[in-house]
Image (cartoon, rainbow, N blue to C red):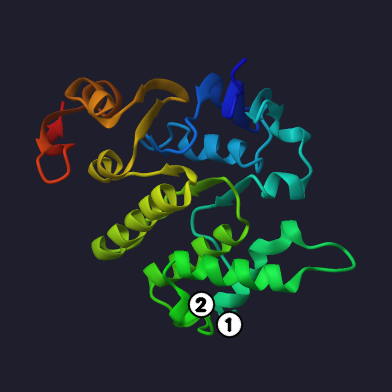
Amino acid sequence: MNMTYFAGQNLTIGYGHKTIISNLNVTFPKGEVIGLIGPNGSGKSTLLGALSNFRKPEAGEVILKDKPLSSYSAKARAKLLASLPQNPQAPGDITVEDLAGYGRYAYQRRWSSDKTADDKAIQLAMVNSNIEDYAQTPLADLSGGQRQRAFIAMTLAQDSEILLLDEPTTYLDLPHQLEILKLIRHLNRDLGKTIIVVLHDLNQAARFCDTLLCLKGGKLVCQGAPKDVFTPKMLADVFNIKAVIQNDPANNCPTLLSYDMI
């Protein structure tokens, strides 16, 4: 029998009396970059909150390695799953290295800690996030892109198999957006991380993701390779736009060439 690696089964999630996602079934392929796309209010961040255990579903279960996510202890869960929310916050005077150290919580015991292992993991996380040159720099002195890489270093220090990133390119200019997206690709291809990321830029989602998962109104509309999901019909049905799409020969990805409201 095949193991269920990471999935949501019959998920219903809401806020107060408002249901955002209803009876959703979704499976996330291991070892891929999976992009969550959809219009505002479609349930992308809500789903990510349930996948990270920040929000308890009203019904259904998140399954991780054939077990309900809710059955894991906090430390056991953190060793498998790391999450970075929108607009993460930390004191401005904390250094990059100290911030990355927060990611070692899951490996620290009450009375002792393997400081050597922690230090190695922190240094490696900063190297893999390309932020090691700023190890002793306070967050307040970093650019937006550097700050985001510092928070990604914190998630990497957890040494988790799965990374959940909620709009990691928001508020960044285009060069810094590309910097973060290429970092995500590096973490996937070179470190073997499974990454689930919410993205608003559809061209970037098609270029940097292996699989796209499209939501509308809390429902799964389609899931598959970018060439199969990123189509004029999907854009019309989900985003209410008429679009011209062409294949970009530079990266062999579908690209939104022009669009207008229907």
- Residue that appears at 57% across and 50% down: 83
Q: Is 113 displayed left or right of 230 in the figure?
A: right
Kindly identify which residue carries mark 2. Answer: 139
The answer to which image quadrant residue 249 occupies is top left
- Seen in the picture, residue 166 relative to 214 is either above or below; the reply is below
Q: How many marks?
A: 2
Q: Residue sitting at 54 percent across and 25 percent down?
A: 21
Q: Dots 2 and 1: beta carbons under 8 Å?
A: yes
Quadrant for the N terminus, please.
top right
Residue 234 image offset from top left, x and y in percent? 25, 23
Percent from the top left, x then y, of residue 210? 34, 36
| Residue drawn at the location 51% of the way across and 23% of the way down | 26
Q: Is residue 240 above or below residue 86?
A: above
Around disc 2, counting alpha carbons within 10 Å, would you say few (fewer than 14), some (14 to 19), or many (20 or more)? many
Residue type (three-letter) at the residue carrying disc 2:
Leu
The quarter of the picture where the C terminus appears is top left
Rendering quarter of residue 199: top left
x, y percent for residue 261: 16, 31
Visible in this render: residue 194? yes
Q: CA distance from mark 2 to mark 1?
A: 6 Å
Q: According to the image, label 1 marks what residue?
A: 93
Q: Is residue 37 above or below residue 1?
A: below
